[in-house]
Image (tube, coloured by chain):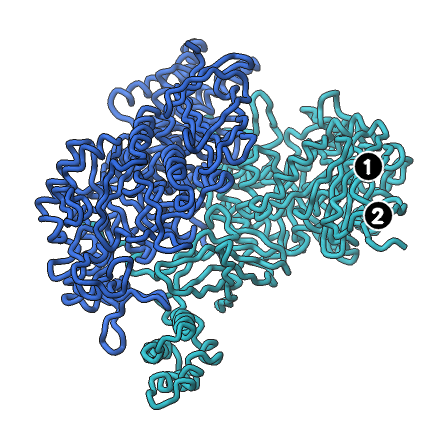
Chain colours: A cyan, B blue
Amino acid sequence: MTELIPGFELPRVVIENVTPILDGGRYPVKRTVGSTVEVRANIFKDGHDLIGARVIHRVLGDSAWQAVPLIHHYDADFWSGSFRADRLGRVEYAVQAWPDHYGTFRSELEKRLNAGQDVRPELVEGAALVARYALQFSGDAAGFLEKCRRELNDPDLGLDERLKTALSPELKSLIAGPMAPNEIAQCPVLELIVDRLEATFSAWYELFPRSQSPVPGKHGTFADTLRRLPEIAAQGFDVIYLPPIHPIGEVHRKGRNNARVAEPGDHGSPWAIGSKFGGHDAVHPELGTLADFEALVKGAQDFGLEIAIDFALQCAPDHPWVREHPDWFFVRTDGSIRYAENPPKKYEDIYPLNFWCEDRKRMWEACRNLLLFWIERGVKIFRVDNPHTKPLAFWEWALRDIHEKHPEVLFLSESFTRPNRLKSLGKLGFNQSYTYFTWKNSAWELKEYMNELIQPEMQSYFRPNFFANTPDILHEYLQSGGRPAFRIRLVLAATLSPCYGIYSGFELCENVPVRHGSEEYLDSEKYEIKARDLNAYGNIKQDVARINRIRRENPALHELGNIEFLHSEYEGVLAYRKYAPNNEILVVVNLDPFHAHETMIHVPIKRLGIADGEPYEVADLLSGARYTWRGARNFVRLDPNDRVAHVFRVSRRVD
Amino acid sequence: MTELIPGFELPRVVIENVTPILDGGRYPVKRTVGSTVEVRANIFKDGHDLIGARVIHRVLGDSAWQAVPLIHHYDADFWSGSFRADRLGRVEYAVQAWPDHYGTFRSELEKRLNAGQDVRPELVEGAALVARYALQFSGDAAGFLEKCRRELNDPDLGLDERLKTALSPELKSLIAGPMAPNEIAQCPVLELIVDRLEATFSAWYELFPRSQSPVPGKHGTFADTLRRLPEIAAQGFDVIYLPPIHPIGEVHRKGRNNARVAEPGDHGSPWAIGSKFGGHDAVHPELGTLADFEALVKGAQDFGLEIAIDFALQCAPDHPWVREHPDWFFVRTDGSIRYAENPPKKYEDIYPLNFWCEDRKRMWEACRNLLLFWIERGVKIFRVDNPHTKPLAFWEWALRDIHEKHPEVLFLSESFTRPNRLKSLGKLGFNQSYTYFTWKNSAWELKEYMNELIQPEMQSYFRPNFFANTPDILHEYLQSGGRPAFRIRLVLAATLSPCYGIYSGFELCENVPVRHGSEEYLDSEKYEIKARDLNAYGNIKQDVARINRIRRENPALHELGNIEFLHSEYEGVLAYRKYAPNNEILVVVNLDPFHAHETMIHVPIKRLGIADGEPYEVADLLSGARYTWRGARNFVRLDPNDRVAHVFRVSRRVD
């Protein structure tokens, strides 16, 4: 004989299909501080009684639950209510529902009155009901309920007076909730992460501090980088991301252009971390001291900038950990330590960590402590190198641990792996992610990819950061398309995604690959110091500054999902609308860096609140030009040698 | 400091998005015996190692898990494998995955060989790997692995021989699985219910035994019903459903046409269950004895028929339970028992049970025991009356309990409530459900409703039974459309849904409502005995017999989801395709019972494997007529006074 299942004792109300939810509650969904969390559920029960429902929520670690009533949308048959995510950190929420006995009593009483039935027996039942509700009250409330109960029960009182008591707003407001705690049904407690605004809206600039010396050929320093801040701030960036700043391995150091053996004086790759000067908690001596780094972090704050550093969990052969904890690495049968390999490729300058070694608890903690070390020195953003080559369980543990103490810290996942794994990193805690944007250059690719990214489920955990180039990715489109291609990709990155970035050299349209067919740069900065004249002829710094200012000034560009692609009669001209309250932006981009194109684009004027035939103004925020348009279908012409794009702000009133 | 989360110790492989699954595993999905269960999952891990995966499954209560390997579909990046549901009952299944160390070793060895690298150090690593795998083996297998290990490690052996060992199929087949149990990741165990075929394919006929006497006005009996079986079997039905067969209450008995007070000699409603003659475990004395009932059940089997009975958990005021367990009902403050009400309507002949009374454990068990009582008497199908007015938790418990002991028992939910609650009954265990079909009469309504029902998630738990009429529902379409309307609805019910039914009188096109605007029958059989001449002029028994034979002979009509609506140039002529291997059916129905219509319908000949211009034959299984068609667009004409529909079987070879 089957044991009575738990449901036998459970409340009668069923709560289903609660949203937002990610993978059945396995992972938290993400929101930004200040946003509204709308919770929905299907709620029903047996029988004809009415239902009451609410969403409860609290910041994790705070014991006080707050409640918001849920409203029943009868035709679509779902319930909803919302609360504001007004504090950083993890928020718990759950839907509760219960049989609304008083509401049912009231509704049936009214039906009987309308049908002219004798309701005196019902008033007696109502008195019994009020008495049951009263059990959970004391003091004045209990007294009031006892008075109501007596009145409902009192045959000597006039019927009108008894009815007035039965239907009084005071009684209703007092007993609208559950009659007893065991009548409350509750869905499993769900979680959401509330991040600061920069998680969803920020412009990034990547630079190598060692290339920042004003003296060509000289090793740059943190101090040199500090001096560059005013110019970078003036271009409108929010985050400066530095590749690893730690001592660079000397054993098996790579030479220029990834030569297997370094020449004397070669500086090596910053991703080969660790030397006699220290490991992940030290700075490369040629960059300066830890104090210099802290000065840079503080200096950045003065310009409204943040310093993000790289978190690359791998070691050069001369990293202190190799000596102190050889068991944290892959030890071969002959006792030697295995370097990184992707057969037939060999990376002798890198020892991967064995995250599943016997001593993994200490090792994971040591890695986590590195984050705490840099957080103490003012770093609040980490760009994580190749996280998919480390255990997903490690990230879930480490990121949650850091976020509990420091909910303001952001992690950007640098993972260009297959979709399931790439997305998983977003689910388990990364606040932002690199994307496939670099490889999406045609109109259909861009539309298809954007439409995937803006799916509500994907948006609930995955925040793209559209880097237009990186030290590892110089796309063929930029190699062949030259300056117009850089301007095109800048506008696309900065307006398609509220988070975007460029790696220095982009503003100079650097586009020479190490060889034909490669996405690697010639003379890559990964292996040497670059001396750049950032004011060289043909630079696109003015474009960068302008697009960053346009982004700041237009709320429509602060969100990801508020995009609608528009019909363009020539496919190679991409048009899309971004919208926010009182802020309508139309972006039109000629994706062809070689030829001018003209076409008609179709504006969904109805959704913009513009009538047929009504004139409206589109002001190009890039060029300053203004046009008066009328109707849906409008002409555009874009010449890559002049204007590669329009970023129109639409206004209905024509001056 | 955060405790290390459990993931820290868990296997490295992530298993996500396992299907089939219903509400995150909260409810079992349903399948029919003999069907193939295809299990899919996204599976990935950190790093570059290969993955092994399988689905394990077993019948609940059976300790032996069986395993089927999962195959990786690389481009779409999911894994899949399948097993056959070959036994009735609950099946547990789960996906397991693990790092495939040997596969990774093998793959990298081959890459190194192709690159011409020295692989001898790798062979030594391979020997260590084989030794770790060997730990879980004994006997011959252990001996073989030890031999492999030695050979891999043996510098005196030729390289070719060592490689042959490393890559041997024998070694591969032995260690393709997990290296150690703690490396196996597993998703939560999911459940599915395997039902017998009748759950998904059956034709139902509803009759009142009391109306089966050949002598008009005389109370019919089980014995009379037994004598009707040959005729019903000849019409091709599978299930005969009987409204409640229990003693009918005498207190507050309803009269004819639902009169509040019965006249002497009135028989009352069978749904007012219980009298001095007994309750739910007794039979109405005028129908015969329990032995007569059992004879009917056995007799039905001889004709390939099954008897389904009604399970209506409510009591007449003179039901024995009212006396024995007044606390199982709703007791008013004055000690009286509350009759059913839906203010302002009153149902004084019915006392609802209070499923949440204090003594509910005993009461729920008593209700469950009623099912066991009738199962012991040969009943294997229950039509459950208004299940949504009883707790969902009760059904989930009771149905699971019955199904564990009697997996062949089927429950049909008679619930015409709002969608969320109606669907929920399917999720928690009902094998079939009444639907909104009766109210879907236009082409767009039918298409929209079918497209909802065939959604994969909905199909995984909800099995529609399209009753064309019931004692409660005589739709206006039948009232006004007369005989052609009955023929149209018969073809629709029987070909749109593999489970369908009619309530007796349908074959005589009975269509007089109690009053205009009501769906109730005049002189409803619910309150009186009906005497019918089933061979009366205008009966459609031949249509019924023919459509039931067509259903049996054509596998395309045995499934729900294998439907495709076809373009018809006149919307009022509905056309759809049903398909199964070697069985292509095209159904064309004129939905207008008043006028003939002709139109062109578009056959997706490509999907039927028919070339442009190739002639093909459509044989009307209803009329016997055959036509040769060519191309997609073909002419049909349907006159409600002659043919209301075509049910074509398509064949490519024209005789």
Q: Secondary structure at mark 2?
A: strand
Q: Quadrant of the C terminus of chain A?
A: bottom right
Mark found first going from the N terminus, 1 or 2: 1
Give above or below for A98 relative to A625.
Answer: below
- 10 Å neighbourhood of mark 1: few (<14), some, or many (≥20)? many
Q: Amino acid at mark 2?
A: Val
Q: Is residue B419 above or below residue A114?
A: above
Amino acid residing under circle 1? Arg
For the point 51% across and 47% down, the residue is A396
Q: Chain of mark 2?
A: A
- Which chain contains the residue that carries disc 1? A
* Mark pair 1, 2: CA separation: 21 Å
Residue on which disc 2 sits: A618
* Front-lying residue, B575 or A86: B575
Same chain? Circles 1 and 2: yes
Asked whether the residues under the numbered discs 1 and 2 touch, taking CB atoms below 8 Å apart as contact, a structural biologist would say no
Q: Residue at x 84, y 27 (%)?
A: A594
Q: B410 left or right of B118?
A: left
Seen in the image, is A113 located left or right of residue A91? left
Residue B25 on image: x %, y %: 38, 45
Q: Nearer the viewer, residue A629 or A504?
A: A629
Query: Which marked residue is nearer to the observer: mark 1 or mark 2?
Result: 2
Residue B370 location (% of width, % of height) = 18, 52
Residue A640 visible? The answer is yes
Residue nearest the viewer, comparing A38 with A318: A38
Q: Which residue is mark 1?
A: A487
Query: Residue A120 is drawn in which quadrant?
Result: bottom left
Question: What is the secondary structure assignment of the residue under circle 1?
Answer: helix
Corner quadrant of residue B554:
top left
Please state the horizontal and vertical placement of residue B132, each as a whole percent of the image.
37, 28
